[in-house]
């Protein structure tokens, strides 16, 4: 039995195999419509989510399986004081696989130690978000036809953004990858990512505060929102939330084949006028989340089309 807690739980080869299956699902959905018949996915979400939870549910239903679960801690026995370990021990009796989101870092690891069924980390605090990373890798591969020799710009909340931390951790395994990290000083990438991931693997990167100056260098611009729920001080959030807003004026600095990605939800960091630009792929990115999660569920349950 395997779990997915971190993007590095999958080898480069396994990640590529998942991408190929996801691309086949996208092209031939009918081939997979009964693969998970009589299988049950439990979604245990201790904090709010729209895209991640619904994409997991959509993925399982499209595979012919069924879904049960809860969408916030207050609607589960966590509100009565039940531990994560006890919850997954019980939920595992009712399901074949569990997707879990939790505000505390390491919660998915704790769950995996007690669970009798595979655990998928659907986001743990500001730590990791491996299925979003798989979604991002599928999207990059779809538009760039490769995962190596790319310059990726990441802009916004790099301190608390678990999607950013997961993506960087996964991409450093591919040769020729470079990063441009765009953020205010207060929201720079954590030392753990800078030292233990980027510097340790000798990955070229630069940290800047102005987006326009570096946009011509990018193959990919990965925008993120400043996350209100991660701030302890409302004044700091208000001061920083509008620091980076991508609009069509800034898009003029980008190359014709650069793509704009975003894990969503968007607040105001990408102007709606950018949505009509063919380089804006974030809604296609959200759709890709269904296909890659279908492929992942199949892999962890040992299912074949």
Image (spheres, rainbow, N blue to C red):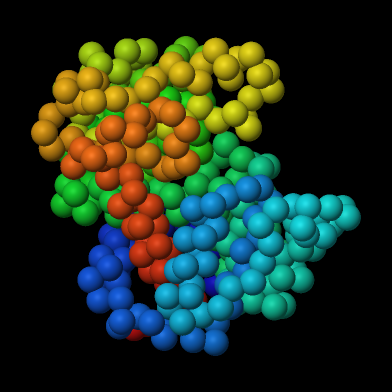
Residue 85 screen position, x and y as percent: 76, 59
Q: Position of residue 163 (x, y in %)?
A: 46, 40
At a point 25% along the width and 65% down the height, the residue shown is 23
Q: With 70 as the anchor, is 40 left or right in this view?
A: left
Q: Position of residue 114 (x, y in %)?
A: 71, 64
Asked whether, in this view, residue 305 is left or right of residue 54, the answer is left
- Looking at the rendered image, the quarter that the N terminus falls into is bottom right
As drawn, 101 above or below 182:
below
Left or right side of 185 for 112: right
User: Which residue is drawn at the image coordinates 45% and 69% (left, top)?
Assistant: 59
Which image quarter: residue 42? bottom right
Residue at left offset 30%, top offset 18%: 211
Residues 122 and 203: in front is 122
Q: Is residue 227 left or right of residue 173?
A: right
**Visible in this render: residue 217?**
no
Foreground of the two, 61 or 35: 61
Image height check: is 56 above or below 206?
Answer: below
Taking 262 as reference, is 23 above or below it?
below
């Amino acid at each position: 039995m395997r779990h997915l807690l971190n993007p590095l739980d999958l080898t480069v080869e396994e990640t590529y195999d998942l991408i190929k299956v996801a691309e086949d699902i996208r092209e031939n959905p009918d081939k997979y419509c009964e693969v998970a018949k009589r299988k049950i996915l439990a979604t245990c979400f201790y904090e709010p989510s729209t895209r991640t939870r619904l994409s997991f549910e959509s993925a399982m239903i499209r595979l012919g399986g069924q879904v049960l679960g809860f969408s916030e801690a207050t609607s589960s026995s966590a509100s009565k004081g039940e531990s994560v370990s006890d919850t997954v021990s019980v939920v595992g009796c009712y399901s074949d696989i569990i997707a879990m989101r939790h505000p505390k870092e390491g919660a998915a690891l704790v769950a995996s130690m007690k669970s009798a069924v595979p655990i998928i980390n659907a986001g743990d605090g500001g730590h990791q978000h491996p299925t979003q990373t798989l979604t991002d890798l599928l999207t990059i591969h779809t538009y760039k036809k490769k995962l190596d020799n790319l310059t990726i710009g990441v802009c916004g909340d790099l301190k608390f953004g678990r999607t950013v931390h997961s993506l960087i951790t996964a991409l450093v395994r591919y040769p020729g990858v470079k990063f441009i990290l765009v953020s205010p000083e207060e929201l720079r990438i954590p030392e753990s990512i800078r030292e233990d991931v980027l510097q340790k693997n000798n990955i070229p990167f630069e940290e800047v505060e102005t987006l326009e100056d570096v946009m011509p260098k990018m193959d990919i611009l990965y925008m993120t929102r400043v996350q209100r729920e991660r701030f302890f001080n409302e004044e700091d959030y208000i001061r920083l939330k509008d620091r980076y807003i991508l609009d069509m004026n800034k898009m003029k600095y980008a190359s014709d084949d650069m793509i704009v990605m975003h894990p969503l939800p968007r607040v105001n960091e990408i102007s709606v006028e950018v949505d009509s630009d063919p380089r804006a792929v974030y809604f296609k990115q959200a759709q890709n989340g269904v296909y890659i999660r279908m492929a992942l569920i199949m892999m962890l349950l040992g299912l074949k089309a």
